[in-house]
Image (spheres, rainbow, N blue to C red):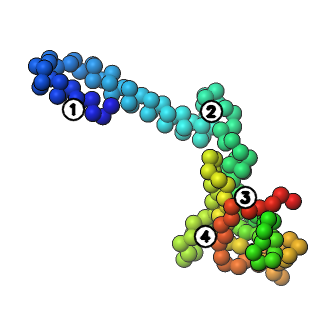
Amino acid sequence: MLSTPLLYQSYRILQNGEPLPWWVWAIAAGYLVVPLALGALTGMAAHKRWWWARPITGPEPEPRGWDLLFKTPALGGYVKLRLKEPGTGNPWIMGLWAKPDPGATSLLPGSYTAGYPYEQDLYLIDTCQITPNGTPVVDASGNAVRRGSALLVRWSEVTLC
């Protein structure tokens, strides 16, 4: 499509062709611009869940519950997982699902998950101490004791209990 003007000009030079009317170029540009604009608008509408996008994308555009859960804007809290083959002997891990602290000096990003169609993985901004039986270690005020280190884990490494 992008080479059409160049090919047309070559034709005119070699064949003494007459120039095409402007509206022919408008139609040719429409073949590129219209589908691009409609696709972008439909993608934005599906993301914002506008009513008219549902017949095109379906009522739930996210194909997995994983995608729907972790896409929730105000989601925050702790995630506790049991590993299939723990390397440290403790099968449990626990981490914090949160956005980065605006006042923090760390350059680490906030918690994140991979979405469909990619393999599910989970990045937690901070990890917490947890006992081998799965009970979180808490401080005197009842808050989970954080380790100050981030964690990246593949969903394929997690077992369902």
Three-letter amino acid code of the residue under disc 1 = Leu
Question: Disc 3, disc 2: CB below 8 Å?
Answer: no
Q: Quadrant of residue 83?
A: bottom right
Three-letter amino acid code of the residue under disc 3 = Ser
Residue at image x 63%, y 60%? Answer: 112
Helix, strand or loop at label 2? It is helix
Quadrant (top left, top right, bottom left, bottom right) of the C terminus: bottom right
Residue at image x 27%, y 19%? Answer: 23
Q: Which residue is mark 4?
A: 101
Q: Which residue is mark 1?
A: 6
| Mark 4 to mark 3 CA distance (whole Å) | 29 Å
Three-letter amino acid code of the residue under disc 2 = Thr
| Mark 2 to mark 4 CA distance (whole Å) | 35 Å
| Mark 3 to mark 2 CA distance (whole Å) | 28 Å
Helix, strand or loop at label 1? It is helix
Residue at image x 64%, y 57%? Answer: 113
Say which of marks 2 and 4 sits in front: 2
Disc 3 or 2, which lies upstream in sequence?
2
Q: Which residue is mark 3?
A: 156
Disc 1 or 4, which lies upstream in sequence?
1
Residue at image x 74%, y 47%? Answer: 65
Q: Which residue is mark 2?
A: 57
Helix, strand or loop at label 3? It is helix
Label 1 Cα neighbours within 10 Å, binned few <14 / some 14-19 / many ≥20 = few
Quadrant (top left, top right, bottom left, bottom right) of the N terminus: top left
Say which of marks 1 and 4 sits in front: 1
| 90 versus 119 height, above or below | below
Three-letter amino acid code of the residue under disc 4 = Asp
| Mark 2 to mark 1 CA distance (whole Å) | 38 Å
